[in-house]
Amino acid sequence: MWMSTFARFALPALRSRSSAAACQALRACRGPGQAAGPPPARLTSVQLRGQQTMVSASVPVASQSVRHARALGEARMVEVEWDDGGTSLYPFTWLRDNCQCPLCTLQSAQARQLVMCDLDIHIGIDSVDVINDNKVSVVWPDHHTSVFDSEWLRRRCFSTAARQSLQEELFLNDRYYFDSKLNIPTGDYEEVLHDDKAALAWLLALRRFGIVRLKGAPRERGQVARLSERIGYLRLTFYGHTWQVQDKNMANNLAFTSKRLSLHTDYPPLHFSPGVQFLHCISQAVEGGESEVVDGFHMVELLQREDPEAYRTLTSTLVDFTDIGRDYCDFLLQSKKHVIDVDRTGQVERINFNNATRDSVLDLPVHQVQPFYRALKAFSDLMNRPENVVSYTMEPGEMVTFDNWRLLHGRRSYVTRPDCSRHLEGAYLDWDEVMSRLRLLRNIVHKHT
């Protein structure tokens, strides 16, 4: 079962639809800059009906009809007036570039056939009219005609609110931050495999909160691969499509020992590190081996507030990472990354923090070395505060799925015996295929509700 209170958090993913998809919920979470709430219970599939998104209600709604359309020649825009009194502006060039006719768009692939060298970016308009079926028809000077569906236009409105709403629908960039109080959202492994609503609920929670536990997987190898097939395919790395986390002689990775693993993200030595990680517990240690996770995006928010200088250093300094060994094949990796990646607006996109693979090569002027270490230590101390760390023990048959770009994860040292050894199987996916499946599931579930 999936927790129904996630409904109010899942709404942005479903946008303004009269009947929204199956979503799950977590009570204890918050948006950036808000106080954490009480911990969540279990998740449940629910249907949301007649709900608005968390974005402004003034965002254009697809069901609106076109009242009037006219060309604004001097501004080179088409102005569309909607039944609710709102208006939208569409540049001539954009309309011509996005003509939906069979000559300009391959509908079976939703791919543009009109090539850029044939696009007149200074094009005018001969006429614009509202025609049958509530569509906008534009006739161009060469007598080519473009017909645009009102819902299609409304969704692509250029207003700030509409653009923000559409970007959130497409990418689900709003996150809900957590601390040690989080009770990690939990679902049923078999339900996710076989039920579209449960699978959508799982992926929405994974995107919003960064981590979901799935119970009830068979206690044998191959289950991470089964789960990946629900999405698409696994990410092949130098450790293979899947890998076995066990205490090994001559280990080629610190994870393959019984030692403590400090909080880290996986694979910063790759220029494009995996976005999502699956870990399936097949057997657990007799003592120790507890897992730890920290919300890295939340830690960045706290660091920026408490130590702006350290934040500036870690968002601007390129750090060398390296990894060498042999597994699926031999490898010698090298990369340069910021510990904290932010986008052009200053929003955190990714954490690259792994003390084991941070290189001894430090490509900095000597006077910048100590400030870098001070910043890195400040970030590490922050994430290791007890109030920020969520600790849990994986039970055999349990799988944890988490955002490797956002969460830092670790493990306490453990004791093992020949007759009772700790064994996890792991795998990676990229966010591209995860988000692709989420969007497809959202469309499927919405269609059937």
Image (cartoon, helix red, strand yellow):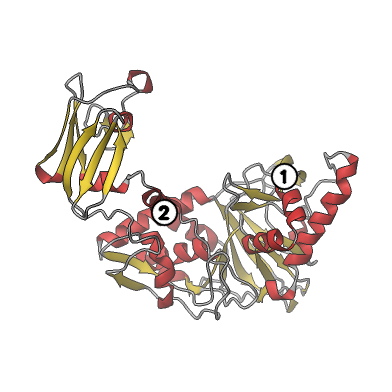
**Circle 2: residue type:** Arg
Q: Give the quadrant of the N terminus.
A: bottom left
Q: In which quarter of the image is the C terminus?
A: bottom left
Disc 2 marks which residue? 437
Q: Position of residue 39 (x, y in %)?
A: 55, 80
Against 419, residue 153 (above or below) is: above
Res. 142 visible in picture:
yes
Query: Can you identify the residue that label 1 sits on?
Result: 316
Residue closest to the eye, 406 or 175: 175
* Mark 1 residue element: helix
**Residue type marked 1:** Ser
Residue 113 in which image quadrant: top left
x and y percent of residue 382 in the render?
A: 75, 66
Report if residue 419 is visible in the image: no
Name which residue lies at 73% across and 56% down. 308
Q: How far apart are marks 1 and 2 (CA)?
A: 34 Å
Sequence-first tag of 1 and 2? 1
Residue 4, image quadrant: bottom left
Residue 22 placement, left or right of 217:
left
Q: Nearer the viewer, mark 1 or mark 2?
A: 1
Q: In this view, does 328 lie above or below 354?
A: above
For image coordinates 42% across by 50% down, the residue present is 167
